[in-house]
Image (spheres, helix red, strand yellow):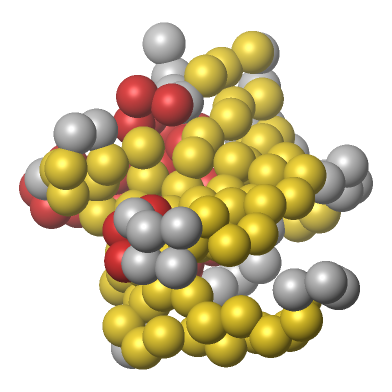
Amino acid sequence: MRKFIVLVVFLAGPAWADWFTVGRNAEFTMYGDASSIQRNGPLATVWVMGDYKVTQSKKFPPPLLWMNFDSVKELKELDCARGLHRTLKTIIYSGHLAKGDVLYSYGSNAEFAPVARAEMDIAQFNFGCELGKN
């Protein structure tokens, strides 16, 4: 199944530069930056972006409180051998496709966790691990 998803990524073509459509659902389109993939043994890092169809509103820690945003980029670290992932950095953008103002940015020292059995989570994991093979 992984090879099928990767094939779909290539057929979808670049959204712009080295960003490829990884998947879509009713709420957003997920993109992955192929040029950002770096491998170190079983570990891979990759930038992914969620571009929302409808402006999102979320409460963030003070002093920002409530913000409206249209896209989010995340730097993911993937353990391709064990099926684990974690988010290292998140950037919230006011506009679509990571355009506009950076509204909020934060890093994380999160522990690795299993990849959720959700379609978008599996798709971004496969994107980073399969395309990152040397």
Viewer-nearest residue: 101 or 21: 101
Res 50 quadrant in image: bottom left
Number of numbered tags placed on the structure image: 0
| The C terminus: image quadrant | top left
Can residue 129 be seen?
A: yes
User: In the figure, is residue 103 to the left or right of 22?
Assistant: right
Image coordinates for residue 45, horizontal then vertical, percent: 58, 30
Of residues 63 and 10, which is closer to you in this image?
63
At which x and y percent is residue 35? 35, 24
- Residue 42 located left or right of residue 133: right
* Residue 30 in view in this figure: no
- 82 sits to left or right of 17: right
Q: Which percent across, then down, holds residue 82?
A: 73, 39
Q: Residue at x 41, y 74 (%)?
A: 70
* 12 in relation to 3, above or below: below
* Residue beneath the point at 57% across and 88% down: 57
Q: Is residue 22 above or below residue 20?
A: below
Vertical side of 80 occupied by 56: above or below: below
